[in-house]
Amino acid sequence: MSETGGFEAYDDQDGPDDHGTGPDGGGGGMRGDGTGRPSDPGDAGHPGDAGDPGDAAHPPRIPLPRASVEDAGRPLPALDAPVPPPVPVLEHRVLKSLLGAWALAACSAEETAAVEDHLGDCGSCADEALRLRGAVGLLQRPESLDLDPGLRTRVLDGCLDRRPPRIPIPVWARPYDAETARLDALLQDFGDSEWHAPVRLRWFDADEATSRRTTVAGVMAHLMSVDGLVAIALGLDDPLGETRADAPTPSGRTEAYWRGSHFPPTRSVRAPWREQSHDLVRTVSFTGGTAGKLEVAYGDFTLPLHDAMLDRAFECWVHADDIAEAVDYPYDPPSPRHLNRMIDLAARMLPAVLAQRRQKGLTSPAHGRHLVSAGGPGRTLRLEIEGLGGGEWLIPLDSPAAVGSAEHEVAHVALDGVEFCQLAAGHVPPADAAAGQVGDRDAIRDVLFAAASLSRM
Amino acid sequence: MTKKDAPPRWDRKMQQRLARGEAAALGELYDRFASLVHGLAHRVLGDERAADGITRDVFAHVWEHPESYDPKQGPLRSWVAGLTHRLAVQRLRATETAALTRAGEGSAEELERKVRHASVAARADYIVQSMPTPLRAALELAYFQRRDYRQAAADLSITEDEARRRLRLGLQLLSTALDTGAPGAPPGYGGAA
């Protein structure tokens, strides 16, 4: 490092003054000054002391006599003092303590001079100085920590191929495992400004677009509070602890958590969220096949455990996307395999939601609707999802108990997979869902509104 | 960052879970160490794809041979770092040797210098990441932000004495990256075997 250059330049400037004031100021009692200064670059063993030989033949000597004349004009020695900064006399202990700062060029010019003086006399300090200088050369900007999110799946799959796990992660929990890992990676390099960036949560409530303002940290608190529903079902700790929620629903719990913390959520929410998500994956791996029977209560409805884990994976992605948008980072959709399972969950939930909406009078009056015996075929809408992770789903329209049937198809909707998920997340109004539509318009409208009503905070 | 000071209990439990064949444990291991592994491999090899490959090899090794980690020898983190270092340097040596014999450019001496340089750089990275946060923060201010030690002391609300101490101690730790034991011996990653 050449910060000694700065020091030498300083020295150069001083040198002439030293020479100039030497005759009269020499008696000023600056021990280190007159003698130490000029010799000190030599002491420190710097090869590049062009300053010294330069001094001898330098034209800038011209101003010197003037300065000394002025000095001479004023016999008071007081003026001498501020001109050459003194090399302070420091004891060995202090000089040694300065070695780190010196190696980093992080001490004053006077201290630098004092240290370099000392290095000429003190072998142990000189050795250490050399070593620390070498260490400074090893400091490097940390490399970007952004790992390719796809690498995790590739690495883990590779491992599991080579040694099949005795306790695998159930297939229905893998989307959650992957999505929480992706979100955690997104959070990795967030600073305070990102954690407190405003985010608007959007969803559909009673067929109206609704939203709620929070921050990135607030979104993480929301995810943790709602994941807590699964934790409770599995007998793990409730992340809300003693906080009482007005309603044991996703929004009730979230509002309670937000209210219950004395300060707005900060980055400190990340670690408990991550720990809980790891615990969930671990626990469902152990409960394995039997856990499918477990029900997770969402307050006003329940989902079987494996669907709840898919639901949480879906929410994790949707909110990760909200966060990424808020901080202007790119964020990809889930892997096609996982996206397909999320779409499948929504498609499976649609018949029950349609039935509820029908009871509330929210659906179109059905033409040709007929009673269907449980397990029998009924009017059907063909949901065609395009893109990676897509597929076709036959949605029975008349009753959740009916079976979708190609022969009874009354309508056909085609949508992109991500677009469909945006609809189900309440981010796209049903009327705007860019869909290719053929057939019964009312049936299509009912299904699109039902999809939007799957969304919640 | 926050996970740096994992208790040894975590290390032992992780090893047991891996030995038991718990896929979820492998995921957690990856989440904790992937950026360390990939970062070190990248520092040695200077290539994204090659670093991906080392990352795959390191986790495969730990997954297939969890018993090769001995918790008594030190933290899992150091062991994983040491393993990464060995595999990455091995790979660098192999690719450089192949290039040498193919193109006939450079010399064996140059190769050794290159390997040593990459090796020291990776170790230095690891030391900086693993040193106590106060030391790293002081070095960060003095080196990257160009603050002198008095300013750094003010920034960190510590005495000037303490700022000097931290800078010196931080550099002393870092300088151990330059120490090599017997040639070819695996580098010491803070107690790694």
Image: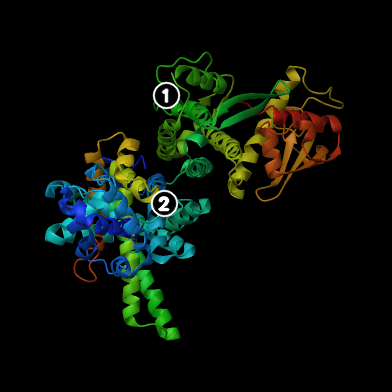
In the picture, measured across the screen, residue A241 lies left or right of residue A124, that is right
- Number of residues whose C-alpha sits closer than 10 Å to that of mark 1, classed few (under 14), some (14–19) or many (20 or more): some
- Residue B145 picture location, percent across and down: 40, 47
Name the image quarter holding residue B7: top left
Which amino acid is tagged 2? Ser
* Residue drawn at (61%, 28%) of the image: A201
Query: Can you say whether B110 is above or below A138 in the image?
Result: below
Question: What kind of element bears circle 2?
Answer: helix
Please name whichever residue, A374 or A284, is drawn nearer the observer in this view of the structure: A284
The x, y position of residue A202, in whole percent, is: 65, 28
Residue drawn 42% across the image and 86% down it: B104
- Please, what secondary structure does the residue beneath circle 1 have? loop
Is residue B70 visible in this depiction of the protein? Answer: no
Q: Quadrant of the C terminus of chain A?
A: top right
In three-dimensional space, the C-alpha distance between marks 2 and 1, rounded to whole angstroms, equals 30 Å
- The x and y percentages for residue A244 are 46, 14
**Which three-letter amino acid code belongs to the residue tagged 1?**
Asp
Q: Residue under circle 1?
A: A238
Residue A328 visible in the picture: yes
Q: Which residue is mark 2?
A: B35
| Label 2, residues with CA under 10 Å away: few <14, some 14-19, many ≥20 | some
